[in-house]
């Protein structure tokens, strides 16, 4: 890493450098990602776009430490994920990274508050403190009044806002969202995106996979992947239509 | 792992259990059912174990001791702390016939009252108890019934607790009696009615219904002391009733309820009395102070029972673990995405394992608690039924907290163990695969199969090498369980091997087999559960088949099949011969009057040497047929052949059933009726005064040798043995009911005397059960005698046990196969949608499910049939060791050690019938509609 690069990545929440992922062997060998570089700083909202099979979801799983890169380096909050044990990776996911999936994000057997406090409880924080932190996170995403409801008693939009609260509970400040509005109607989708935008404005960092150009407009930056390579990187967040929903 | 994380895991497990109510109820039921059984058994076992105080009260009421007079009052004896016939022996100077010391002779000449005064502590108060000596006939609503007569003053406070008054009032006036509830039920009599003992005319009014708490089925009449014995003593002896007075027993109370010490017991022993003392029962002396030791055979039998029970319980627990395992695997599979989410939230493998294990703890705990409560409630509700079945009242309703906690713990551990493998599997799956629902099939681990095979072999070796000792009893259990676990470890590899058969099968079975082989994670536990169920059934069936086969080969028919045998008991009196003949004639008339067309009657007598009745000039003796030299057991054992009970050449060494007659006298029809011998030569020979034998081994140079023994008065050394050789013939017999037959004239000439009188008929058709009962009733009323209808060897309960086991094994196997099939159906929705898309008919789903169910059942049954033979062979060995311990293992005699018999028909039913049944049920109950696929929670 050169001096310039080190300067560039200082204070970055997520930094990918030359990351490749190869699935399978021989004839079934597939290059999901080819030498991808990406840096995300606090307060930054990055949208990842691209056609099906372009490697968007693979990028997210590598960034979250759910999968391991074939080559290159993934750093979260300065920690090289490739050098961590399985247990340490779990700890990073508990303390530094939050996930939001397209649907079925929440554990059906737990209430909204319990879902949010889960990473903290797994981390050994007392139930009372974990619940207090969960209520704060739920208030920040605007769903505090649903704290004691079970997932099947919440609408899709409410479930996604609970999921964002869980992704950011405690010290965590990196949200990895895989099509978070894919299963929602447009109004609910907009609300979820506005919450995500607001959390980033408050200091969190977010990487969102989407194939809706309109949704990408909420991001500060849009990265376009094709065949596992970054083919385009442009500014997001046009002035039109976003201010009133913020 | 922190407490908070544990709490979170248990919370998810608990809520999941509540959400999946059907699956949770199934698992809880699976764990609760055996716990109900074990709890019930524990409560019954504890409740029937009487405290010393309860034992004393049942025996002696409120008295301090129960004293019995031995057959030789005045002669010294030794007894155990609780005297029984087994642990009491009259001491003697030498030999089997005790010779008293001059001092003992002097004592025995004294009257009993005087002896009691010397034997018991001063100031002891005595209450006489007349214990019965055999059964008497008495009038009932239906005719005559058998009853024991007791003489005891039930109004005396000392007898309180020996009986429980159920109805009426205790007999207080002359010729009032109390009857046991057992007798009233059998006789149809009620309190207030009367009964008359056979041979007497005095009606006895029943004023009370009582029960003996320890003997609920006892048939007894309890009169005031002296009354019933007086009536029976006055009966003329020709009437044929056993009239000897009962043993002379006493309830003893000491002033101020002083303790009847062990020293006092030993003092009473010196004078020929046995004493059961309340104080000694409560606080027994050290074993070293008791000269009469416990019976070692009892300890051996208890050990065998414990071994068999422990093996059965251990295998049952393994079965629950295996059966509940797939249910947990289903749960873990269904919540795969949820567990993936947990991992995405930062849960590590331990966290995920804890969630699945938490399910085991929650459901195991719920099942165990429900089982213990239900078991306790069942035992409480069924108390009187249980007491009736066991024939004794509980001492008290015993709930032992330590036992119950232990049982709950076993239930929880069972649930936990069942969840272990699914937990490990769930924790191992890659997070991305769990989140996306992608499942990758991996080849089975070779090391696991090799380790499993080695474990199975080691387990089998351990089980089969088990010795009959306290540690050996565990080795059978440990070995059997180890062998099964080894085979379970091999199942993934075996399933994979089975999968290769797929290419030879049509579409539906091919798909089912390949699918099962690919998804070994869900197939293996289900196959293992079927395997364990079938193995358990095969083990018991094989063990039982061995016992049955041994019993069958040891069975000796008392007559040809269908024959009716009447045994008229000897009657004593002034002219015993005339009385016995009169009784026999009455009995024969009763039989022939009850069933017409019995055919020709054959009368026979069992022959003895000498008449042992104490009349002047009489002597006691014995006659037996000597095998010809070279025909004894040692000769055949030397040829490497094991003798059996039916091998006549071993007649002198093999233990024999009671019903084989040695030497009998009779006419030609006896040969046909009793022995099934239809040789004209034999009939002619009998008429000519020759001896007819059933085994040529008794014949040498055309002669049969009879050994006549006249017993000496002072022991075996004084015996006079002589032999007599008579001309004889041997002829084949269908029933080995007697060794040698002589004509009455030849018997008399040989100096033999007829003893028992028997008659045999061979009716053209076998008696119906109703006819047999009617005839038995007629015989019972006519006089002392016994009727038997020879129906060949009949296994008592084996058919019912086999049927019950087959049903239980089938139910378990079907349940396991159904669980696996349900899981497969959930997993293969995508495949089915694809099949439907390429034009498969709707019935494909039904056929696929049917074959999936059958495949699991077939694989499990096949492996289980092989696995079950290990514990069966091991238990068979423990049984055989038990016999060797009893008969000595030094010689070649191995009678009683059961052979290993494989029950082929039952095996065929399990291995072929079970998969067919599973196939049929799944085909009937599977919906054929293919659901649209959608990602599910």
Image (tube, coloured by chain):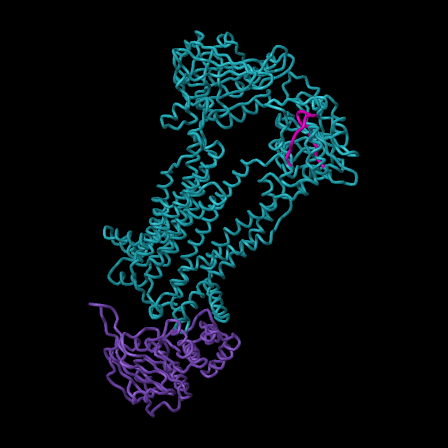
Chain colours: A purple, B cyan
Q: Nearer the viewer, residue B372 or B314?
A: B314
Q: Residue at x 38, y 26 (%)?
A: B638
Q: Nearer the viewer, residue B550 or B210?
A: B550
- Extent of the magenta region: B65-80
**Residue B28: in sight, yes or no?**
yes
Residue B354: which quarter of the image? Answer: bottom left
Asked if B745 appears above or below B271 in the picture, the reply is above
**Residue B597: in sight, yes or no?**
no
Residue extending furthest bottom? A239
Q: Is residue B72 magenta?
A: yes
Residue extending furthest left? A27
Q: Residue at x 41, y 16 (%)?
A: B628
Asked if B59 appears above or below A92 in the picture, the reply is above
Q: Quadrant of the C terminus of chain B?
A: bottom left
Q: Is residue A145 magenta?
A: no
Q: Position of residue B645 (x, y in %)?
A: 44, 26
Asked if A121 appears above or below B259 in the picture, the reply is below
Residue A196: which quarter of the image? Answer: bottom left
Q: Position of residue B199 (x, y in %)?
A: 67, 20
Number of numbered discs: 0
Asked if A62 appears above or below B869 in the picture, the reply is below
Q: Position of residue B516 (x, y in %)?
A: 31, 56
Judge left or right: residue A182 versus residue B711: left
Q: Position of residue B300 (x, y in %)?
A: 52, 38
């Amino acid at each position: 890493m050169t001096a310039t690069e080190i300067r560039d990545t200082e204070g970055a929440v997520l930094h990918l450098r030359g990351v490749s992922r190869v699935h399978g062997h021989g004839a079934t060998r597939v290059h999901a990602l080819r030498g991808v570089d990406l840096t995300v700083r606090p307060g930054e909202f990055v949208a990842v776009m691209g056609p099906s099979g372009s490697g968007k979801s693979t990028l997210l799983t590598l960034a979250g430490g759910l999968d391991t890169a074939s080559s290159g380096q993934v750093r979260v909050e300065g920690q090289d994920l490739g050098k961590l044990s399985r247990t340490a990776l779990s700890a990073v996911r508990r303390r530094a990274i939050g996930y939001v999936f397209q649907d079925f994000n929440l554990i059906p057997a737990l209430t909204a508050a319990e879902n949010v406090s889960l990473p903290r409880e797994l981390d050994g924080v007392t139930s009372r403190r974990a619940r207090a932190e969960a209520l704060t996170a739920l208030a920040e995403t605007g769903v505090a009044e649903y704290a004691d409801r079970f997932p099947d008693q919440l609408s899709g939009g409410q479930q996604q806002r609970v999921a964002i609260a869980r992704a950011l509970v405690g010290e965590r400040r990196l949200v990895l969202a895989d099509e978070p509005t894919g299963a929602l109607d447009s109004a609910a989708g907009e609300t979820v995106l506005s919450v995500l935008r607001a959390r980033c404005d408050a200091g969190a960092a977010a990487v969102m996979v989407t194939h809706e150009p309109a949704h990408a407009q909420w991001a500060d930056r849009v990265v376009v992947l094709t065949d596992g390579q970054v083919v385009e990187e442009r500014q997001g967040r046009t002035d039109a239509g976003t201010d009133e929903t913020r | 792992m922190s407490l908070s994380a544990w709490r979170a895991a248990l919370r998810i497990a608990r809520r999941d259990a509540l959400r999946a109510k059907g699956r949770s109820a199934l698992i809880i039921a699976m764990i609760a059912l055996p716990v109900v059984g074990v709890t019930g058994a524990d409560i019954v076992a504890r409740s029937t174990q009487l405290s010393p105080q309860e034992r004393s009260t049942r025996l002696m009421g409120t008295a301090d001791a129960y004293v019995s007079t031995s057959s030789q009052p005045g002669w010294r004896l030794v007894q155990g702390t609780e005297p029984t016939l087994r642990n009491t022996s009259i001491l003697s100077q030498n030999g089997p016939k005790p010779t008293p010391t001059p001092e003992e002779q002097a004592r025995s000449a004294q009257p009993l009252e005087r002896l009691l005064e010397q034997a018991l502590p001063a100031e002891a108060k005595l209450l006489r108890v007349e214990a019965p000596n055999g059964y008497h006939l008495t009038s009932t609503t239906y005719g005559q019934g058998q009853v024991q007569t007791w003489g005891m003053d039930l109004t005396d406070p000392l007898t309180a607790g020996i009986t429980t008054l159920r109805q009426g009032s205790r007999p207080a006036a002359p010729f009032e009696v109390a009857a046991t509830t057992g007798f009233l039920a059998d006789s149809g009599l009620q309190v207030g009615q009367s009964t008359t003992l056979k041979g007497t005319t005095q009606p006895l009014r029943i004023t009370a219904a009582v029960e003996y708490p320890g003997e609920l089925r006892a048939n007894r009449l309890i009169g005031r002391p002296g009354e019933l014995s007086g009536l029976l003593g006055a009966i003329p002896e020709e009437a044929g009733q056993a009239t000897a007075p009962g043993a002379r027993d006493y309830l003893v109370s000491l002033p101020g309820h002083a303790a009847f010490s062990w020293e006092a017991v030993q003092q009473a022993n010196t004078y020929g009395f046995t004493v059961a003392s309340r104080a000694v029962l409560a606080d027994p002396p050290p074993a070293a102070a008791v000269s009469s030791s416990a019976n070692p055979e009892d300890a051996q039998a208890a050990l065998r029972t414990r071994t068999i029970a422990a093996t059965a319980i251990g295998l049952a627990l393994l079965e629950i673990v295996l059966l509940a395992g797939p249910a947990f695997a289903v749960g873990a599979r269904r919540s795969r995405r949820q567990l993936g989410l947990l991992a995405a939230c930062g849960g590590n493998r331990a966290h995920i394992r804890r969630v699945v294990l938490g399910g085991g703890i929650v459901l195991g705990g719920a099942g165990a608690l429900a089982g213990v409560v239900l078991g306790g409630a069942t035992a409480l509700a069924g108390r009187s039924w249980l007491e009736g079945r066991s024939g004794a009242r509980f001492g008290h309703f015993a709930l032992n907290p330590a036992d119950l906690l232990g049982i709950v713990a076993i239930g929880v551990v069972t649930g936990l163990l069942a969840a272990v493998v699914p937990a490990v599997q769930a924790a191992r799956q890659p997070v991305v695969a769990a989140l996306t629902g992608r499942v990758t099939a991996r080849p089975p681990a070779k090391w696991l199969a090799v380790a499993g095979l080695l474990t199975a072999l080691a387990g089998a070796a351990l089980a089969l090498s088990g010795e009959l000792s306290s540690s050996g009893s565990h080795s059978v259990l440990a070995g059997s369980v180890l062998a099964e676990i080894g085979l379970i470890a091999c199942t993934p590899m075996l399933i994979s091997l089975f999968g290769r058969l797929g290419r030879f099968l049509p579409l539906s079975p091919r798909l089912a087999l390949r699918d099962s082989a690919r998804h070994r994670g869900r197939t293996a536990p289900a196959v293992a559960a079927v395997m364990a169920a079938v193995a358990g059934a095969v083990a018991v069936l094989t063990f039982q088949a061995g016992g049955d086969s041994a019993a069958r080969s040891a069975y000796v028919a008392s007559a040809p099949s269908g024959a009716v045998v009447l045994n008229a008991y000897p009657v004593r009196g002034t002219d015993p011969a005339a009385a016995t003949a009169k009784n026999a004639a009455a009995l024969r008339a009763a039989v022939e009057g009850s069933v017409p067309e019995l055919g020709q009657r054959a009368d026979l007598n069992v022959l003895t040497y000498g008449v042992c009745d104490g009349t002047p000039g009489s002597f006691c003796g014995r006659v037996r047929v000597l095998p010809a030299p070279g025909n004894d057991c040692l000769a055949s054992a030397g040829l490497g052949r094991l003798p059996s009970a039916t091998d006549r050449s071993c007649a002198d060494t093999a233990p024999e059933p009671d019903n084989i007659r040695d030497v009998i006298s009779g006419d030609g029809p006896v040969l046909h009726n009793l022995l099934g011998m239809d040789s004209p030569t034999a009939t002619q020979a009998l008429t000519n005064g020759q001896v007819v034998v059933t085994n040529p081994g008794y014949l040498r140079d055309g002669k049969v040798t009879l050994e006549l023994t006249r017993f000496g008065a002072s022991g075996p050394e004084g015996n006079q043995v002589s032999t007599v050789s008579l001309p004889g013939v041997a002829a084949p017999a269908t029933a080995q009911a007697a060794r040698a037959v002589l004509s009455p004239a030849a018997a008399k000439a040989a100096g033999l005397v007829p003893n028992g009188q028997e008659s045999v008929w061979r009716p053209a058709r076998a008696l119906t059960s109703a006819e047999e009962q009617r005839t038995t009733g007629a015989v019972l009323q006519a006089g002392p005698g016994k009727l038997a209808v020879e129906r060949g060897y009949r296994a008592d309960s084996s058919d019912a046990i086999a049927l019950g086991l087959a049903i239980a094994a089938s139910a378990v196997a079907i349940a396991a196969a159904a669980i696996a099939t349900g899981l497969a159906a959930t997993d293969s929705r995508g495949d089915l949608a694809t099949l439907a898309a390429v034009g498969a008919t709707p019935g494909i789903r039904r056929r696929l499910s049917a074959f999936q169910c059958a495949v699991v059942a077939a694989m499990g049954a096949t492996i289980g049939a092989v696995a079950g033979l290990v514990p069966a062979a091991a238990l068979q060995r423990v049984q055989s060791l038990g016999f060797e311990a009893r008969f000595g293992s030094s010689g070649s005699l191995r009678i009683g050690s059961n052979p290993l018999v494989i029950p082929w028909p039952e095996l065929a039913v399990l291995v072929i019938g079970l998969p067919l049944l599973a196939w049929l049920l799944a085909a009937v109950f599977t919906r054929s509609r293919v659901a649209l696929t959608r990602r599910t929670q």
